[in-house]
Amino acid sequence: MLRCSRSSLWASRIAAPSSRLSTGRPFRRGFAAVSDVSGQPKIGEQLHGFTLKRVKQVPELELTAFQLQHDKTGADYLHIARDDSNNVFSIGFKTNPPDDTGVPHILEHTTLCGSEKYPVRDPFFKMLPRSLSNFMNAFTSADHTSYPFATTNAQDFRNLMSVYLDATLHPLLNSNDFTQEGWRIGPENPLAVASGGGGEEKKLVFKGVVYNEMKGQMSDASYLFYIRFQDHLFPDINNSGGDPQKITDLTWEQLRKFHADHYHPSNAKVFTYGDLPLADHLKEIDARLGQFSQIQVDSDIKAPISLDDGPKFVTVKGPTDLLMPPDMQYKTSTTWLMGDTTDVLENFSLGLLSNLLLDGYGSPFYRNLIESGLGADFSPNTGYDSAGKVGVFSVGLNGVKAEDVPKVKEAIAKTFAEARTNGFDKIKVDGILHQLELSLKHKTAHFGMGVMQRLQPGWFNGVDPMDALAWQETVSAFQNSYAKGGYLESLLDKYLLNDNTLTFTMEPSETYSEELVAEESQRLVDKISEATEKFSSKEEAEQYLEKRELELLEVQETARNADLSCLPSVHVKDIPRQKERKEVRHSSLGDVKVQWREAHTNGLTYFRAIQQLDNLPDELREMIPLFSSAIMRLGTKDKTMEQLEELIKLKTGGISVGYHSSPSPDSVESYQEGLSFTGYALDRNVPAMYDLLRTVIFETDFDGSEAEKQIRELLQSSASGAVNSIAETGHSFARTFAEAGLTPIGRLNEQTGGLSQIKLTTGLASRPVSESLDDVIQKLKAIQSIAISNSKTFRVALNCGNESSTSNQEALQRFLTGLPTESSNVTSTSEPIQYPRNSKSFFPLPYQVYYAGLAIPTVPYTNDAGAPLEILAQLLTHKHLHHEIREKGGAYGGGAYSRSLGGVFGYYSYRDPNPQNTIKIMTEAGAWARDRTWTAQDLEEAKLSVFQGYDAPQSVSQEGMRLFLSGIDDDMLQRRRELLLDVTAEQIKAVADKYLVQGASRSNLAILGERKDWATKEAGWDIRDLGMADKIKEITAQSPEE
């Protein structure tokens, strides 16, 4: 998987990892006890091939960190011992990309395609259903590649560590793995060629999983802006993901050499976390690393260009955003270089400074850049990036008019100058520090993975991980510096009040996408010509390429039934038949029902509530996403949003309002919908949290003089980059639309979060200023009038400690007393929106690849057929669809899913170059499953896959939420668990026939992507426009001739 940014958001670098406190049981052996240092090894001691270099206890995070070095190879190793059963492993390598061919990314894929100890094709994907892991993946970052997993099962941990170590250090790197995952030239439809087809189906095209993935990435204008910005700021760090125009220059030999040079223990950083014994890890890891000797490796830490002779200006061309107004197509940013990120205090302080300047509607940059009308939203590179050796601070905008591009830089400089003059309010700094205090107390189920992801970028670039873990020391040092006065202002003086800058601008080109197509066509001609030179004729070269494609198909087909006995596995017998129950109790405060989950929450209270809204008209439902944003933007008659944001940060861990819908467990035709309210706070601040919720819900001023302007800002911000958000998760949008015509809940989801919602938002965003938004505002006020009430349609869930139950009940009672006892009635003025059923819908979008979703109605949660359908989805994904859609078809992803609560079974593909073939595979999948002879091992693996989700660790804040949100009680869940464990092959075949074969006539299909001649009304397609059709036609008419 490609990580397209150099780091996660700046906040991840200043936000403390969430704490998960001890359950009271003794810490497990292995030099790990946080509170007992007596059993720890001594610094300098040699342990199973490693030497212990340092030990650091971090009481506020309840962990002990051990930094070791492998004696024979010099590999770095960091172990974090903590009383947490969700153990984490990662091995990573410094992988500075030598060019833009994407060799680190393609190597990440091919490394997982088979190894010496596990010589089966694609052991990574084949391990997915042989594991109980709750996280398995691999990441290619800008200058390093990592392979992490997490699991609560000790045997599973040992299995996966063995597979990961062998995959990275001893991969087979077969040539057909390179052509499958990287790139190749082959017939567009090799299956048709194999059966004697010709014509268009024999047309030669570029193929490859990574190649198609990166074509999809390049369809995302936000990614393109970011990567081109990085190209100019860090020219020594090439595109690790790969530019499709350069990927086709990579050879198999270059891939193998890159592995030999970089995937060596001397270039490795190993990370483990959790409660498993360190000694056991050391023995296993040393056995693998000890086969190597130390070598010199390329561990160069690349630096950005110098801006000492600034200012510098760079302008590049990019695609137009067809959902944004044509005069708001520019993206521009200005960048400063900061200090050495190994200075942990300064690094923390700059992250906090970035928060003060950029976070929230009241922040200086939001006011001066977005509220002023210069742009629609911040650019993708905005913020403080501390992933590299040198920190980078950028501020920019999307959706800028051509004449406003120079004004953006002027406004940025003006904002810095104003901040220097005005300083920073203490209440804002205190609010951020309060958020950090809460993050230490908040108990998350994935603490270890979060620590790994936060530490790794800096660790590969010279930041001491022990310093980065010293959380309280860093915060205390900041508080001491801040208390002296002028500290944050001095950082402005030091780094930002100058013009040593890089201003990077992307200007729109209406022919950009067409030029990409033309370039690819010419490059294909050139590559075929190169291949022809090795043969006596072009025909012979084409025959060779066809033959190679068919040989790859044969290899892929043979791998389907390969012996996998060499791969380790956990077993269904390891899954407990009885699920541990989290006790909840219920009470009533007047007409309001309250669910209580009393557990150790570390002094925090988690609040969630649902206001049920019956007979909600479509015209209000579709406005709820905007309402949820507006009440956190507009402010009240006596408080600005800036003042409210200060209080929210100072008193809570956040509050939010959103749309809620859930089908009945007993019927797919029944559902509940309404508004959801969430928030959490220290126990002492719960009354303040309720006051803030009440204020934003009831007192938001939709009639204020600035209200319409601010709502336009929200709409334009949502519309900005909507095309890119579809490009990122297009399969999800396709599935949602396909489901919309099948069930009531599908219709609601499409209205509030699907393509229909995007079309509504972008349409409102493009409404001229001369046309009022009064109709929109009236609907928002109508939602406000029914949002919450002290009545039987309102229910609450509280997760808190036993010690705070009484005070929480008193605070809740006071909150309820201040609510109206009934909500207003709202009547519909229009017919309900209907979505197609038994249809094929095509959405023309400017992408180089496609996204597909096919959905079929099935059964409610309590129906016994739901369990075999859930197992069937895993069987089809791992035994058929991954093989056909990804390996053979070249899509980045594809599979099946079963919405156990929603009553829908479906298929999807993601970044798919061949949707016609995928549709055929999907429509025939039911018969394939019905006719296949399923083995006991097949069922074993599918059940393990299902229980990865069922038995994944859960945060205390989420305990009891299944019951509260969807009505699934412990008895229902236990019955479902037993049904899943007992699913038989006969049941699989029966549900495949009944629902997927016989029920296929009731299915819906949705495809997103470039419209081709096969997507016509005559062929049964319903062509649906998101407001881009005319623009796409205009651009197509201007396409350059090939």
Image: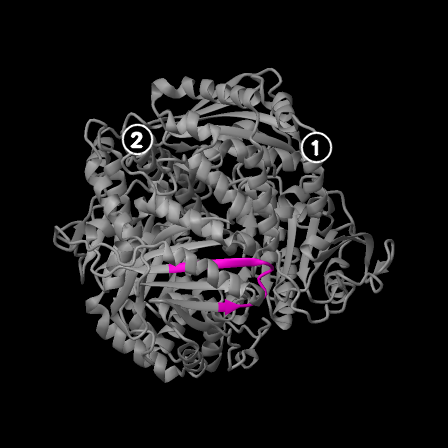
Q: Main secondary structure of the magenta part?
A: strand
In the image shown, does 408 or 1003 lie closer to the viewer?
A: 408
Q: Magenta span covers which residues?
A: 597-609
**Visible in this render: residue 251?**
no
Tag 2 and tag 1, C-beta contact below 8 Å: no
Residue 481 - label = 1
Residue at 65 percent across and 60 percent down: it is 165
Quarter of the image holding residue 876? bottom left
**Visible in this render: residue 359?**
yes
Drawn side of residue 576 relative to residue 1000, left or right = right
Secondary structure of the residue carrying numbered label 1: helix
Mark 1 neighbour density, 10 Å: few (under 14) some (14–19) many (20 or more): some
Secondary structure of the residue carrying numbered label 2: helix
Drawn side of residue 747 relative to residue 580, left or right = left
Q: Position of residue 622 (x, y in %)?
A: 25, 49
Q: Position of residue 913 (x, y in %)?
A: 35, 50
Mark 2 neighbour density, 10 Å: few (under 14) some (14–19) many (20 or more): some
In the image shown, does 715 or 398 lie closer to the viewer?
A: 715
Identify the residue under disc 2: 709
**Quadrant occupied by the C terminus:** top left
Does 605 lie within the magenta span? yes
Residue 774 - label = none
Residue at 53 percent across and 26 percent down: it is 335
Q: Amino acid at mark 2?
A: Lys
In the image shown, does 877 or 398 lie closer to the viewer?
A: 398
Placement of 396 over or under 281, stated as above or below:
above
Distance from label 2 to label 1 (Cα)?
40 Å
Drawn side of residue 781 relative to residue 131, left or right = left
Q: Amino acid at mark 1?
A: Ser
Quarter of the image holding residue 304? top right
Placement of 547 over or under 370, stated as above or below:
below
